[in-house]
Amino acid sequence: MTTQYLKQKILKSLPANISAKELALVKKALSFAESAHQGQKRKTGEDFIHHPLRVALEISKMHLGTNSIVAAILHDVVEDCNVDLKQIKSEFNKEVAYLVQALTKVNALTYKEEIREKENFRNIILAMAKDIRVVLIKLADRLDNMKTIWALPPSKQRKKSLETLEIFAPLAYRLGISDIGAQLEDLAFPYVYPKEYKDVKQIIGKRREELENYLKQLAPYLRRQLKKHNLSPLTIKFRTKHLYSIWRKLKKEDMDISRIYDLVAMRIIMSNIGECYEALGIIHQLWKPVPGRFKDYIAIPKPNGYQSIHTTVFAKEGRIVEIQLRTKKMDEEAEWGIAAHWLYDAQKANPQQKKKLFQPTKRLYWLKQLQEWQKKFYTSQEFLDSLKIDFFKDRIFVLTPKGDVIDLPDGATPIDFAYQIHTEIGHQARGAKVNGKIVPLDYKLKSGEVVEILTQKGKLPSPSWLEFVKMIEVKRKIQDILRKKKKI
Ligand code: MN
């Protein structure tokens, strides 16, 4: 791949309606970065400029606007070429300079060995809470670095790969960009768990290819059946499960590959939600569903916004296969994650648009919460701890009696739940019902449970709650009111 080729590819990837001014800005960034990195080489032996160009291409796919692409092209010039931020500000604009500066800061921390992982992690998160574009560029940067990690010495390979598995891949999933998350995991897997990687590859053998061929033959038959009911899928695709995720699942299934039904899944894209359910009904009439494996993420989306219906059926010849149904919009969102919620390139950037840019949708409530926490406890230990607990660990979703979904950390109690509904409900809680039965207030909630809080007007929280509530922010609220009322 030549520099010229990559530059052309970036220009081709730009939206057709890009303004002359913005196009000029991208072109200027291309020649600016090229001359700044002149003579520099990557460990792979290629010209350094290839790296930022590939990062910019990845960013261009996310449709985050011209400034993000320009910042991606320039992301290493301050760190590696002694280019001054002031110069970037005057040659380009304030926003580009801000993005490059933020990336340089995050990089400075990720690349210095002596910085503890936690620090590094914190800075990434804080950067994200301020401007998610920084983290998206950082993820694209890490993805490209992982693709060329073979060129690094073994000690660095392991360290970077571990960091990728522990921090960057979960971050990508949390932002709903599962494609990048999966790529990061598979690139890091062989360096962190070399033996397991080999084993998994051997266990899988040709199973994935075989299953994909089988599903491809099944698709036209299914299309005909749906057609009989006047349903035509927009697309039928095939999703191959990636190695790292197969390994995680194998560990849960006693390394028995025959128990993993979704090595390849058939993904059916319908025009609207109603058609998804209609098609599901027809599929279940055609092939019996495997009990306990049906998941409706359309009715109850995952915390990162993911929506689809998943079902597993006994298909032709009794083979067990997973089928996923979703609309085109859901499919795009699953692919582009948080970027799809921005709709940035739909309109030209203007101050109002910018405001919209940083407003996460309802389904990305956790991000909004993150921004609020960040404002409150900017550098405190508690903020870090709350992130560790609430951000990276698994989440559960429980329901209110009205059917609203509440997203909670694993291990949350009815008190944690009550405070998510309303602070007053939390303060005044005197009892809780789960699926209609009274439970103790320190009960550990499980996904799917319906939780109802019984309250008593004017009641105060009990100090004993502090011993079992899970969420740091809930603890804080309890402490605040008790302190105010001089109860502790
Ligand atoms: Mn870089």
Image (cartoon, rainbow, N blue to C red):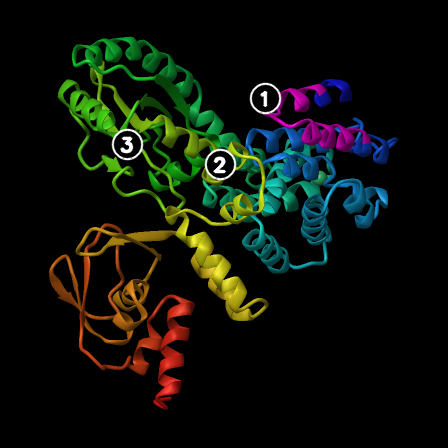
3 or 1: mark nearer the eye = 1
Q: Earlier in the sequence, mark 3 or mark 2?
A: 3
For label 2, count other residues whose C-alpha is less than 10 Å away and answer few (under 14), some (14-19) or many (20+): some
Element marked by disc 1 = loop
Does label 3 point to a residue whose CB lies under 8 Å from ligand 1?
no
Kind of residue at disc 1 = Ala
Q: Quarter-wise, where is residue 133 in the image? A: top right
Element marked by disc 2 = loop
Q: Earlier in the sequence, mark 3 or mark 1?
A: 1
Q: Quarter-wise, where is residue 149 in the image? A: top right
Relative to residue 387, is residue 42 drawn left or right? Answer: right
Image coordinates of residue 187 in percent, x first then y, are 58, 33
Residue 16's disc is 1
From the viewer's side, name the closer residue of 28 and 215: 28
Q: Which residue is mark 3?
A: 310
Q: Which residue is mark 2?
A: 343
Image coordinates of residue 139 in percent, x first then y, are 59, 41
From the viewer's side, name the closer residue of 123 and 90: 90
Q: Which contiguous range is marked in magenta?
A: 8-31
Residue 30 within the magenta-colored segment of the rendering: yes
Mark 1 and mark 2: span between their CA atoms?
Answer: 16 Å
Image coordinates of residue 246 in percent, x first then y, are 42, 33
From the viewer's side, name the closer residue of 463 and 163: 463
- Please, is residue 210 above or below residue 420 in the view? above
Mark 3 and mark 2: span between their CA atoms?
Answer: 27 Å
Relative to residue 347, is residue 470 drawn left or right? Answer: left
Q: Earlier in the sequence, mark 1 or mark 2?
A: 1
Does label 1 point to a residue whose CB lies under 8 Å from ligand 1?
no
Residue 23 within the magenta-colored segment of the rendering: yes
For label 1, count other residues whose C-alpha is less than 10 Å away and answer few (under 14), some (14-19) or many (20+): few
Kind of residue at disc 2 = Leu
